[in-house]
Amino acid sequence: MIALSFEFLAGRYHATEWDHHVNEGTIEWPPSPWRILRALVSASYRAQIPEAKAWQVLRQLAEPPVYELPRAAHGHLRHYMPISGDKTTLLFDAFAAIEGGAASPAKLVAAWPSVTLNAEDLAVLTKLSENIGYLGRAESWTAATVLDDWAGTPNAVPSGSGSTEAPRLAAERKAAATISLPALQDAAEYAAWRRGFLDAQSGKKKRSPPENLWQVLHADTGQLQKEGWSHPPGTRGVIYELLEQPFAVTRTSRTVPATPVKVVRFRVTSPVLPTLKHALSIGERMRQAVMSHSNAVLQRQLPIFCGKNANGDPVQGHGHAYWLGEDHDSDGSIDHLVGYAPDGFDGEAIRVLHHVRRLWGAEGHDLELVLIESGEASDLGTTLSEAFLGKTPLLGEAREWISRTPFVPPRHLKKGDFPEQQILRLLQLAGHAAAVKVESYDAAFQDEPQARHKPMRWLEFRRERFGGAGARGSDRGYGFRLTFETPVRGPIALGYGAHFGLGQFVAVR
C-alpha cells in the first residue's frame, strides 16, 4: 500500500468545490483525487521531473484513494474587496480549520490500498511530494510525505469499495454523509469519449478537450468554466462515504505546553520575502513584536523576550530568546523564523507567541507569521546533507558547520584575539565543545550543492542594529567553517547581533 500524508502548516485548508462560487462558502472535503493529482503534476515541474517519469507514477494513482481525515471545523473570513473607485464587494473565504491548529495540525492521509511502487517510482513520488507547496488554494500551505507502510484506518471511502487488498473499511458502520468528488477517468474510456465528442460537434464554435489525461490534469479551471464545461473533461464523479460527520468539531481553548520548550519555529510568507541579508532587521523587529504583544496580553514584559529582569537590569548569560531568520530552501530569502531560548519558553511565553502574526518587512512588504512548531532542537533539526523535510539545519547535530550570516566580532581585533580566537572563546561561553578547526568561509551558499542562490558576500548583509546596544569591535563581517571532534547540536549563533540573526551557522554533516 502507498499513501500520502498532508500536513496543512497554517492549520487551515482552503479549497472551493468545482462549479461553486467562493461566496457559497463550500469546501471540497476531503481534497478530491483530481486535485491531488493536479498538485503532483505541478510539483513535477518544480522538481524538474520529466513527463514520462511523472506520468508513470501518476497513472498508478488514478484510482480513487481512501482517506483518513483529521477532525476539522468549518470556518470563514469576510473580506471587502475593492472593485472600482469607492465600490467594494463582500467575499467569503471558507476554510476547514484542522484540529491542532497551526501549532500542531493533525494530518490527512490519502492511501491507495492496491498500489505498490517499485524503488524507482517510489523515489519519484517522494521527490514530487517534497515539492508540493500547497493543496487547494495558495493559502493552504502544505507539507506532503510519502508513507509506504501506512496501516491506518480510513474514514472516507469510495462507495462500494471492494478491494481485497484494502484494510478493513468498517463496512458495518453506517455512512454519516456522502459526497461526490472528481477523479481521473480511465485512459481508454477517455480516448473513446473524446473521439465521439469531436465527431459529434457541429457549427462554428467547437470545443477541443485535452488530448490525453496528462493534459487533462493541466487544464485551467477558469478557462474550463468559461467554455461552459459542466465538469472537467477527463474526470468522473466518485461517491465517497464519510464514516464520520465532517466538520463536527467543537471549539476548544488553545493548549500550551506544561513544561518550557526551547525552540519555536514560524513560517514566513509575504508577496516579496525579505532577503537573508536583512536577517538582523527581521530579528530586531521580531523582538519588538513579542515585547509589544507581551505588554498587550500579559500587561508586563517577560525576561525571556526582553533580556531584562523586573528591575530593568540585564539578565546574566544568554538564556533569553534568539530570533534567527532562516532560509530553508537556500534561495536567498527568509522563509522561516526560528526562536531559541536556552532558558525555555514557558506557557505564558507560548501564549504571547501565538498572538504574533505580522511583522513590518525589511523591504517594504509586511510579513505574515504562523507558529508551526515548538519543541526541542533534537526534534526539529537536520543537516544540509540529510535535508529532512520540515526540519532545519540551524538546529542540526553535526561535526561540520558553516556560516549562514556574517560573524561580527564583539571585541576589537588585536594580537591573540582575532576573529578565529573570538569564535573559540564564544563557543566555550555558549557551552559548545571546542572546534578542532576554524577555517575562513568567504560567502553564504558558496559551496552548498543544493543552494538555489549565488554566493552572498558578507559585506552585502546588514551588520549594524537600528537601535539598542551590544558590544561590537568592528563592522566587518566574517565567515567560518567549523569542524568539531564529535557532533555538536545547534543552534550556533555567535558574536554581535547573535540574538537577532547574525553569526548563525548551519549544520553540514
Image: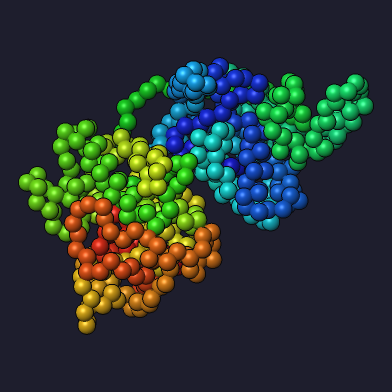
* Quadrant where the N terminus is found in the figure: top right
Residue drawn 40% across and 47% down? 363
Depicted 164 relative to depicted 404: above or below: above
Residue drawn 40% across and 62% down? 460
Residue ranking furthest to the front: 85
Q: Quadrant of residue 302?
A: top left
Depicted 23 relative to depicted 458: above or below: above
Depicted 268 relative to depicted 176: above or below: below
The x, y position of residue 357, in whole percent, is: 35, 37
Left or right: 75 in relation to 171: left
The x, y position of residue 494, in whole percent, is: 28, 64
The x, y position of residue 14, in whole percent, is: 52, 29
In the image, 66 versus 169, the foreground residue is 66
Residue drawn 56% across and 28% down? 15
Left or right: 134 in relation to 427: right
Left or right: 103 in relation to 416: right
Residue drawn 62% across and 20% down? 20
How is colour applied across the structure in the image? Answer: rainbow
Specify whether residue 381 is in view: no
* Quadrant where the C terminus is found in the figure: bottom left
Specify whether residue 133 is in view: yes
Left or right: 189 in relation to 171: right
Residue ranking furthest to the left: 311
The x, y position of residue 456, in whole percent, is: 45, 64
In the image, 86 versus 174, the foreground residue is 86
In the image, 397 versus 319, the foreground residue is 319
Number of dots carrying numbers: 0
Residue ranking furthest to the bottom: 415
